Image: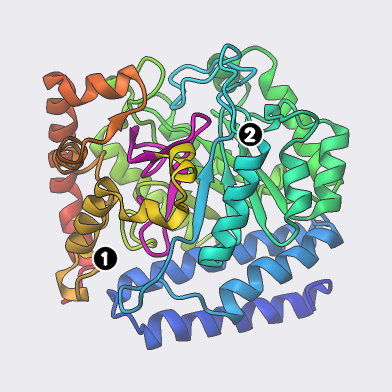
Amino acid sequence: MLENRLSRKILVDIVSRRLHQKLVVKNEDGRPKGVQELKHAYMMALFHGFHRAMTSGHISRNVLDTLLGSVLENLIVNERREGPSTEHDPLVLVVSPTGTCNLKCEGCYAASDLTKHVSLSWEIFDRIVTEKRELWDSYLTIVSGGEPFLWRDGERSILDLAEKHPTEYFMTYTNGTLIDEDAAKRMGELGNVTPALSLEGYEKETDARRGAGVYRKILDTFERLRRHGVPFGVSITPTNRNWDLLTSDDFLDFCVEEQGAVYIWCFQYMPIGRDPDLGLMIAPENRLEMLKRTRRMVFEKKILFADFWNSGIASYGCISAGRPGGQFYIDWNGDVTPCVFVPYAADNIYDVYARGDDLSSLLKTPFFRKIHDWQYEYGFGRPAEEVGNWLCPCPIRDHFDDLRTAAVSTGARPINEAAAEALEDPGYHRVMTEYAEEYRKLSDPVWQDEFEEK
C-alpha cells in the first residue's frame, strides 16, 4: 500500500482516524483534550513528512521495510502506552559516543572540537543499545555529539553499529559535512538511519556560525541523501539573532519543499556549553510568537516542526531523567545526565557496569528520582484539570530553582566548569528565574484558553 500514492493516502487517513480514536476519544490516561489534539497533529505531521518523501521518490525500499517493521508496528500496532496509570520505561536513549567534532561552532552546547578525543568504546555503546531493547523494548536511539560520523573504535563506525542492530532505528544529529557518497549509499541500504543536519539559516547565517563553505557542503549532502533514498531532517538552533528567519515560512518551505526534509527539530539556544551567553536566549515574547508559528506549521502545513520547549505540550511536559515514555543522555565520558541540556550527572555508565548494574538502575538514582517527583507533581501524574502549564515544561529553562535544588540536594556532579559556575553564579540564577517568570506571565493565558481542562 505504501508504494502506491493513492493507497498510501488511504492508509494515512486510516492511521489518522485510529490515532484520533485512541488519543482523543478514548484518552485512557485522562490527558487534557487540547493536549491530545496537538499530540495527534504532531504524529500525523510525521506521517505526512514520509508521505511527501515517498511521493518524491526519496525513500529507498530498505528504508520503507524498516519503517514498517520498527516504527509503524511499534507506534500503531503494538500501541506502546505512555501514561502514569501503568509502570512504564523510557522510550529512547540519547548517546553522544564522541566529543570530537571537525567544526567549532559558536555556543555549541557540547563545547565540541577536534581537541576532544574521548569516546565511548564499541563494547559500551553496543551494550547500551542491546540492553535498552532487552530491558525496555526501546527501538529508537538518538546519536549526538560531537560529530557522530567521526566516532570510531578501530575500524568500526556508527553505521557498523546500525548494521549490527537492524531492527533499531538511529537518528543522528550531524553537521552533515562528513556524509560522503559511500556513507549516503550505505544508509540507504541499511534503512535504519536518519540524519538530522544542522542549519542556521541560509548560507550567510550557517557559515557565520559553522565556518566558510559549510552551507554548500550541507546542500551537497542533502542531494546525496535524496538520491540514495535516505529520509533526513534539519536541526536548527534559534537565538535572539535568527529566530525570525528560522521559523519563517520561506525558510521552512526551503527545507521541506525544496530540499526534502521529512522533519525539523528546533532547539532554542540554551546558555550552556561553550562560552554560554545569556543574551542569546530568545526573548519571552518572541518565544511565544514561535509557539504560534510552530502550531501553524503542524496543523495547517502538516510539517513535523518540533520545538524542544514549545512542543513540550505534546510530550506531556519534560521527558528527561528516563521518565515513562521519555529519555536520558549518556555522553562520551560515560556521564549520565537527565538530558543533553541539563549538564549535571546522576552517575557514569562505566561505574554502573563495573558494579554489575544495568541501565534501569539509573532510573533509581536520587537525582533522577527527584526530577521524576517534580514531573509527576507538575502534571505528568496529575488529573487533567490539575496539570501545570506545559508551555513552560523545562526544569532548567522554565523552573531553574527546582532544577538547581534537585542537583544540589542530591549531589549531582557538574560535567564541566560552565555547569559548576551556573549553580553558584547569582547573576545566572537571576536571569534564568526572571526569564521564566516573564514567559510564564505571557504563556499562562494561552495555556488556560487553549489547553487547560475546565
User: Which residue shows up at 31% across the image and 73% down it?
Assistant: 84
Q: Give the residue drawn at x 31%, y 19%.
A: 418
Residue drawn at 30 percent across, 24 percent down: 419
Which secondary structure type mostly characterizes the magenta part of the structure? Answer: loop
Relative to 70, is 228 on the left or the right? right
Q: Residues within 10 Å of mark 2 (few under 14, many from 20)?
A: some
Regarding residue 311, the answer to whether it shows in the image is no
The answer to whether residue 342 is magenta is yes
- Where does label 1 land, which residue? 380
Relative to 342, does residue 3 appear above or below in the rendering? below
First of labels 1, 2 by sequence position? 2
Q: Which residues are magenta?
A: 321-347
Rate crowding at label 1 as few (under 14), some (14 to 19) or many (20 or more) other CA atoms within 10 Å: many
Circle 2 SS class: loop
In this view of the protein, which residue sits in the foreground, 61 or 155?
A: 155
178 over 48 or under it: above or below: above
Residue 153, compared with residue 402, is above or below; it is: above
SS label for mark 1: helix
Mark seen at residue 121: 2
Farthest residue toward the front?
355
Q: Nearer the viewer, mark 1 or mark 2?
A: 2
Q: Amino acid at mark 1?
A: Phe
Report how far apart the C-alphas of labels 1 and 2 lie in the structure. 36 Å
Residue 58 at x, y percent in the picture = 80, 53
Q: Residue at x 16, y 47 (%)?
A: 440
Residue 80 belongs to magenta span: no
Q: Tag on residue 99?
A: none
Q: Is residue 151 left or right of residue 294?
A: right
